[in-house]
Amino acid sequence: LASRINRFQIHYMKNKDIEMKIEKGKNFNEETNELIRKKFYSQFSNDNKLIINYVDKIEPAKSGKYKMIINDLSETTKE
């Protein structure tokens, strides 16, 4: 998948949906999209919804580093 995806970011949202941002690589194709979905649903419950957003660029955090995972669920468990 290295030549198909330049960068990705996973966002665990409060409603338990999971958003995946993907910067497409030069060899990205529909087969890549299907592989991602199949792998996701083999690892997660069908209660989780996968939302894939294809973006031109994933912006770094204020620190300048790229966050691979953003987790809003940890905030809801503290309440």
Image (tube, rainbow, N blue to C red):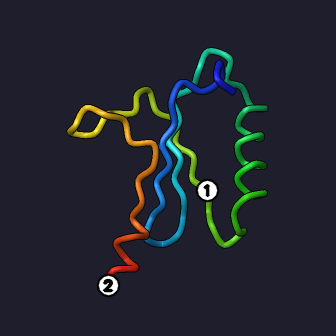
Question: Could you say which is closer to the camera, residue 56 or residue 40?
Answer: 40
- The residue located at (52%, 69%) in the rendering is 16
Please determine whether, in this image, residue 3 is positioned above or below residue 34: above
Please determine whether, in this image, residue 37 is positioned above or below residue 79: above
- The residue located at (39%, 65%) in the rendering is 72
User: Which residue is situated farthest in the left direction here?
Assistant: 62
User: Considering the image in quadrants, where does the N terminus appear?
Assistant: top right
Please determine whether, in this image, residue 49 is positioned above or below residue 37: below
The number of numbered badges drawn on the structure is: 2
Question: Could you say which is closer to the camera, residue 30 or residue 25?
Answer: 25
Labelled disc at residue 40? none
Q: Position of residue 44 (x, y in %)?
A: 69, 63
Q: Amino acid at mark 2?
A: Glu
Residue count near mark 1 (Cα–Cα under 10 Å), binned few <14, some 14–19, many ≥20: many
Q: Position of residue 31 (x, y in %)?
A: 78, 32
Residue count near mark 2 (Cα–Cα under 10 Å), binned few <14, some 14–19, many ≥20: few
Question: Could you say which is closer to the camera, residue 60 or residue 53?
Answer: 60
The image quarter in which residue 59 lies: top left
Please determine whether, in this image, residue 59 is positioned above or below residue 6: below
User: Considering the image in quadrants, where does the C terminus appear?
Assistant: bottom left
- The residue located at (62%, 63%) in the rendering is 49
The image quarter in which residue 50 lies: bottom right
**Which residue does the numbered mark 1 point to in the structure image?**
50
Q: In what element is the residue under mark 2?
A: loop
The image quarter in which residue 33 lies: top right
Q: Are marks 1 and 2 in contact (CB under 8 Å)?
A: no
Rounded to the nearest whole Å, what is the CA distance between mark 1 and mark 2? Answer: 25 Å
**Which residue does the numbered mark 2 point to in the structure image?**
79
- The residue located at (75%, 48%) in the rendering is 39
Q: Position of residue 62 (x, y in %)?
A: 21, 39
Q: In what element is the residue under mark 1?
A: strand
